[in-house]
Image: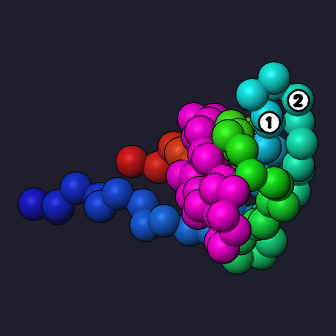
Amino acid sequence: TVPPKPAGAPRAVAGATIVATDQAGRAVARTISDGHGHYLLAVGPGTYTVTAEAVPGLLHAPAPKRITVPAEGGDGPTVDFQYDTGMR
């Protein structure tokens, strides 16, 4: 017998557009992920919804994530998204 194919290993998604919106729904920051799938959004203290937009060739965009950036400074939260490649 042949074992089922394992789930696809995570891989970086380059060129993904990432947007932060404030509580009023206004886009306050936008960026594009680099070749390693990394991105940085510069926003002030507050609560935001971070959205990764659909990428051609992948099934759909991941669900948005809500974050809070603290007022006391330091590094903000890390937000990772996982796209569905459609491979099973």
Q: Going 42% across and 61% down the picture, which residue do you hit? A: 8
Q: Is residue 58 left or right of residue 53?
A: left
Q: Residues within 10 Å of mark 2 (few under 14, many from 20)?
A: few
Q: Which residue lies under the disc numbered 2?
A: 26
Determine if residue 15 is in view: no
The span picked out in magenta is 58-82
Q: Going 17% across and 61% down the picture, which residue do you hit? A: 3
Q: Going 47% across and 49% down the picture, which residue do you hit? A: 87
Q: Main secondary structure of the magenta part?
A: loop
The amino acid sitting under disc 2 is: Arg
Q: Is residue 59 above or below residue 11?
A: above
Question: Which of the 4 image quarters holds residue 61?
Answer: top right
Picture quarter with the N terminus: bottom left
Q: Secondary structure at mark 2?
A: loop
Membership of 62 in magenta stretch: yes
Q: Which residue lies under the disc numbered 1?
A: 21
Residue 10's spot in the image, x, y percent? 48, 65
